[in-house]
Amino acid sequence: MFADDKSGAFDAGVVTINSIDNVAAGALSGKLSEDGKTLTVTTASAVSKRYNVVIDGIKAKDGSAFAKYDEVVTFAADTTAPAIVSTVKDSASTFTVTFSEPIKQIGTVTYKYADGTPVADGHVTHNFTTTTDKVTFTLTSNIASGKTVIATVIGAQDTASNLLSPNPATVTMVKGALDGVAPTVSAITQTGATTFTVKFSEQLAANPTISIDGTDVATASVVKDATDATLYTVTAPAVLDGAKTIAVKGFNDLSGEVGADTSKVVVFTKDAAAPKVASSNVVVDATDSKQYLELTFDKDVKVDTGKVTVTGTFVKDHITNTITVADTEVKPDATNKKVVRVNLDTLLGDTTTDVEGATYNLDLKFTGVTSAAGVVVEDAKATFTRGKDGVPASGAVAKVKTVIQDATNNNKVNVTFDQAVDGASATNAANYKIDGAVVESVTLLPAVTAAGATTQVAVLNLKAGSNEFTGTRNINISDVKALGSTKVMEPFHTNTEVLKENVAPVVVSAKLTGTTEITLTFSEAVLDDTAEDFEVLIEGKSQGTAEKVTTGIGSTAVTTVKVAIAAVDADKIAKGISLKALDTIDVKDAAGNALSVPANIVVTQ
């Protein structure tokens, strides 16, 4: 629904408000209530008269779509003037003024003392932000306690351009007394290659001045924390390494108590660890509708003429091909310092190696991409399915049609999706959970279209021997995307599928119990057909005429069986007798697991 999946600008076509009477609503933004039931839409311009309101593409949490809303709505013009409804003293020197509605501009604000003399410029500040209903005023330490300051607001307007009433309006503020306790610096802590925090004993009236080795840090580089009003993050102009003198000065608390200038030697450690790629994803750019490989690192990175060279393979129609492309441009993300992007059209080369629908497995080697401390990022790997450029991001959501264990191989479980799926997410083993079994890897089969419907199967490869019992299982599947979509699937759960155990039987012992007989003991009851199972070896070698035998177990499961062999003499016994499994061996347990014979079986006496 939202461009950033949270709030603000909408995805294209979700909400449109078109004026019928030529009173444009302007850009739209929105916010969803905490319970997810109320969507508040904000228009950039004041609305009045008739509008065609269209709401489409909104879905419930369960993935079901709401019916499209397409109606003509009449909005009454806002003619009510805003007013000041309250003034609250937050501390000795800060006051919050609340208006009856959000205002788009505060107009002109002047300050005078109670005796009518003007307050010097900068001795009172306010933090007005457009389209808010609250403004905080701060009486700085230049104003003595007990002093009364009268703020006069002229020309404030609401979002419909209605002027404040009365206009002008006044606010009276009385500076509180000093609280008797001066603020102090509690701690200075390194937080990154170029950042550290300064913690104070209490909230300050304004940002402090911070210097590193005698040079003041730029004002914009000292930022108060959004959740802890006593904490400030400082960004140094260069990488922090070794002993530095950190000076903190020019600060006072909300009551006006002035803190003593503080100087401290802090030993910083240069971050020598290389950034690693934490995740990769194919995204469709909202501007050019082209596909990009988006890589997210485990820490902030810098891009200085960044390049990436790829080598690897891609698979299309069961055919594996190789690819090598050097020095493709890497671009930093505009908002997230951990993210970089690479244009797939450039990364994958010409039409012989840039193939729509192919699944790529690439090794990435970077140049010009480093940590904030200048350490070159580590090489990485990426797996994804190539979509088509020029096609806007899809909102399709994949669904699971069936989950069925393979009919002939208990180590495989086939998950059928109702459409083609993204290779990177569909082959991520972490997206599949089967209670009592381990999904070791996932193989994605080609999408198949029949009778106008497309399906695609992901084969879950279970770790051999990890599924120890036959029975129904809890199976959970999540985070798989439809091919070319930006949306992950709704979590899927089933507990109706019966899975057969996949513990392969083995030969526990093989004993020569007669000159023409070997007795085999198995780890569990096994069955057999008529195909030849073993070759009898002497001294580890085939005999002059290869001797091939069958267990002759039949359709009744047994744990021991006597295998008839050609007569052996003392010489053959001395040289050593062993059994080699043949390609035709068909011994299996009741669940269908084939006998495991990792090496030749030594026959003992």
Image: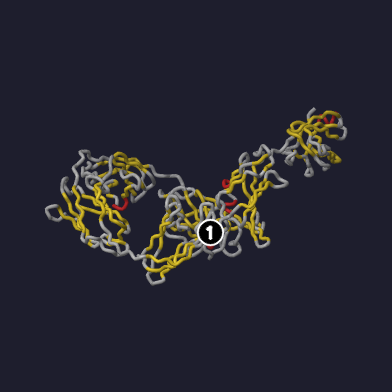
**Extreme residue toward the top, this view:** 605
Label 1 sits on a secondary structure element that is loop
The spot of residue 190 in percent (x, y) is: 36, 43
Q: How crowded is mark 1: few (under 14 residues within 10 Å), some or many (20 or more)?
A: some
Q: Which residue is drawn at 28% across and 47% down?
A: 210
The spot of residue 474 in percent (x, y) is: 61, 42
**Does residue 114 appear to the left or right of 91 in the view shown?**
left
Image colouring = secondary structure
Query: Looking at the picture, which amino acid does disc 1 mark?
Result: Gly
Which of the image's four quarters has the C terminus? top right
**Does residue 344 appear to the left or right of 541 in the view shown?**
left
The spot of residue 443 in percent (x, y) is: 64, 50
**Does residue 111 appear to the left or right of 402 in the view shown?**
left
**Which residue is denoted by mark 1 in the rendering?**
395
- Quarter of the image where one finds residue 179: top left
The spot of residue 130 in percent (x, y) is: 31, 59
| Most foreground residue, 50 or 23 | 50
